[in-house]
Image (spheres, rainbow, N blue to C red):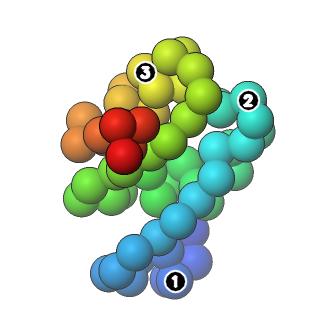
Amino acid sequence: MQPDYQWDTKGLTIVGTGIRAGLQTTPEALASIHRARKVLFLVADLLSQEWIRSLNPTAESMQRC
């Protein structure tokens, strides 16, 4: 299923992964992470960090901020 045209626009998109990343992430959020030119994230556990990085190699943690 292709996401609506609104997901193909340029700009800033903010998505939540849910408390259990990967299990509670919506298809729209997943598509946004995949397609992003740059992903900045802040999650609580290492497993979620690695999962996000596996979806998009540009992913960078904001934990140091």
- Identity of the amino acid at label 3? Glu
Snapshot quadrant of residue 45: top right
Label 3 crowd (10 A; few <14 / some 14-19 / many >=20): few
Three-letter amino acid code of the residue under disc 2? Arg
The quadrant of the picture occupied by the N terminus is bottom right
Q: Is residue 34 visible?
A: no
Q: Which residue is mark 3?
A: 50
Q: Residue at x 35, y 37 (%)?
A: 64
Q: Are marks 3 and 1 in contact (CB under 8 Å)?
A: no
Q: Is residue 47 above or below residue 44?
A: above
Residue name at image x 51 percent, y 83 percent: 6
Q: Which of the 4 image quarters holds residue 59?
A: top left
Distance from label 3 to label 1 (Cα)?
A: 27 Å
User: Residue type at mark 1?
Assistant: Gln
Q: Which residue is depicted at the point 52% across and 65% down? A: 14
Residue 63 sits above or below residue 5 on the image: above
Location of mark 2 (residue): 20
